[in-house]
Structure formats: structure tokens, C-alpha cells
Image: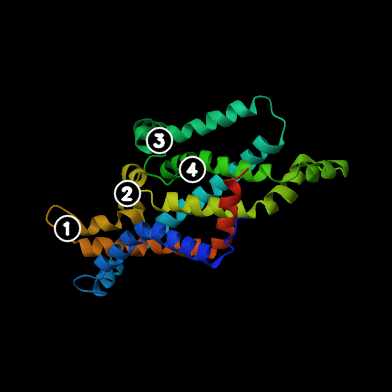
């Protein structure tokens, strides 16, 4: 790992990092300041008093939890197969999977709507969970495969000599050793699923199935546009993501950096 040894280099590096961080911090600071404008903390009290707020958190938590589980299972098994198993044409399938990264979410709305209607999952959690998981998996597989490539093949060869099957090698070596990249997958998937707005807006028409990203709409309308409450709603909705990142920060950084290098 590169290290700044001299005092001058450390100071310069700290200044560069600070300058790079400021553009990302300014919108957050402005959001918090805007949420406290006018009535101050009463803005948060009014937002927390919305009767549907517990349902928003419940629905978002269900969608995020199931999406994370699907993405993790598919990602870790696919990465193991692409990295360690001898599968004919696996590179072709891998690049075919990565081609999905070129498809923006909005382009898929029409075919997803037809599919959800045909399979009778429209206005259910699955109409949002399955597309969200499918859109997350290509990128997480890319990161995880690179991480799994760094695990020595000798471990699996020794396990085979001892009579261990491929499944046992996966369970006892891949799953424990990939905890750092698993933390990165969890955080990235949580951010993607928790912040999803377009898919829940289109596929969840039942008011009892609305998610946390739709909370600001309660303070916007034809004759009402209370930006202080909208910003307070955004701050409240971001709290679970911040907590999740802080809880998994070390593993997340290790996994993301290792998954980005080969």
C-alpha cells in the first residue's frame, strides 16, 4: 500500500483529499441546513407525525432486505463459478452479464410492466424486488469475481485432495473469505434499493405499499411545495443508509478496494 512518508507529502495529501471531499459535502450540508429553515426542529416533528411513515420504513426495509439476500446469493455463487469453476464459455456469459450494465433503468420500464402484469406480480413487492436485484447483480458480480480471483487455487486443490466436494469448498472457503466484499455488496445494494424511486412509483400503486422515497411527495402538490419538509424527509430517509455504512465501514472499504484490483 502506498504511504506518504514525509510530513510535507502528508499535508499535501490531506489538502487534496479535503478539496475532493468538499463538493460531496456541500449538498449534504445544504440539505440539513434547509431542513432546519423556518420552524427548525419542528420540521422534523411534522414529518415524523405523518401517519404512513411506519409503513414507508416497513415497505422499504422489506424490499431492501429481500433484494440484498437475492443479490448476495446470486453474486457469490456466480462469482465463484466464473472465477474457480471450469465452465465452457464462461467468459462469454460473463461479458454478456456485464452488457446489462449498459441498460438504464428507465429503458426497461415498459417491458418490466408487461412482464409484471403477465405474471400477476404487479402491485406487489416482487414487481420491485426482482428488477432491482437484476440491475444490481452485474456490477456486484464484477467486483466479487475480482475478489475471488485473489483467493489462491491451492486452497481448493488441497481441499479436493482431502476429499472435499466443490460445494463444501464453496461453503467453508469462499463464503468466509469473501466477508469484506460481501459487506460492500450489502451496502451498495442497500443504497440502490433504499433510494429506488421510479420502480416503486410505477409498480406499487397501493398506498399501503409506498416506500420511504415517496415521503417527500406528501409535502408537494399543486398548491403546496414545502421544501423544508421535503429536505427533512430526505434526511430522515437517509439515516438507515448512514447507519449501515458506519456499521460495515471497515469491511466495506477493504472489500471495495480489493474488488477493484486484480
Using a 10 Å C-alpha cutoff, classify the residue at mark 3 as few (fewer than 14 neighbours), some (14 to 19) or many (20 or more): many
Dot 1 lies on which element?
loop
Q: Residue furthest right?
A: 162
Write down the residue under mark 3.
Answer: 116
Q: Is residue 248 left or right of residue 154?
A: left
Q: Nearer the viewer, mark 3 or mark 1?
A: 1
Comes first in the chain, label 4 or label 3: 3
- Please identify the quadrant where the C terminus is shown: top right
Using a 10 Å C-alpha cutoff, classify the residue at mark 2 as few (fewer than 14 neighbours), some (14 to 19) or many (20 or more): few
Distance from Cα at disc 2 to Cα at disc 3: 15 Å
Contact (CB < 8 A) between labels 4 and 2? no
Q: Is residue 213 left or right of residue 225?
A: right
Q: Nearer the viewer, mark 4 or mark 3?
A: 4
Write down the residue under mark 4.
Answer: 136
Distance from Cα at disc 4 to Cα at disc 2: 25 Å
Answer whether residue 173 is visible to the viewer in this image. yes
Residue that appears at 30% across and 66% down: 32
Amino acid at each position: 500500500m502506498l504511504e506518504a512518508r514525509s510530513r510535507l507529502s502528508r499535508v499535501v495529501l490531506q489538502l487534496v483529499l479535503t478539496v475532493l471531499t468538499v463538493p460531496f459535502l456541500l449538498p449534504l450540508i445544504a440539505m440539513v441546513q434547509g431542513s432546519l429553515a423556518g420552524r427548525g426542529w419542528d420540521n422534523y416533528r411534522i414529518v415524523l407525525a405523518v401517519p404512513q411513515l411506519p409503513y414507508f420504513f416497513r415497505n422499504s426495509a422489506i424490499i431492501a432486505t429481500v433484494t440484498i439476500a437475492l443479490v448476495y446469493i446470486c453474486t457469490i455463487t456466480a462469482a465463484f463459478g466464473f472465477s474457480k469453476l471450469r465452465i465452457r464459455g464462461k467468459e462469454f456469459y460473463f461479458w454478456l452479464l456485464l452488457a446489462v450494465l449498459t441498460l438504464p433503468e428507465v429503458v426497461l420500464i415498459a417491458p418490466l410492466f408487461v412482464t409484471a402484469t403477465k405474471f400477476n406480480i404487479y402491485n406487489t413487492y416482487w414487481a420491485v424486488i426482482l428488477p432491482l436485484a437484476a440491475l444490481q447483480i452485474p456490477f456486484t458480480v464484477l467486483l466479487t469475481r475480482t475478489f475471488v480471483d485473489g483467493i489462491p487455487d491451492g486452497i481448493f486443490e488441497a481441499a479436493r485432495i482431502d476429499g472435499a466436494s466443490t460445494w463444501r469448498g464453496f461453503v467453508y472457503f469462499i463464503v468466509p473469505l469473501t466477508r469484506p466484499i460481501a459487506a460492500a455488496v450489502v451496502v451498495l445494494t442497500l443504497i440502490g434499493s433504499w433510494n429506488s424511486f421510479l420502480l416503486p412509483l410505477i409498480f406499487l400503486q397501493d398506498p399501503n405499499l409506498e416506500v420511504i422515497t415517496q415521503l417527500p411527495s406528501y409535502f408537494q402538490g399543486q398548491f403546496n411545495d414545502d421544501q423544508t419538509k421535503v429536505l427533512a424527509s430526505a434526511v430522515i430517509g437517509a439515516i438507515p443508509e448512514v447507519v449501515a455504512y458506519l456499521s460495515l465501514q471497515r469491511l466495506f472499504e477493504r472489500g471495495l478496494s480489493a474488488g477493484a484490483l486484480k
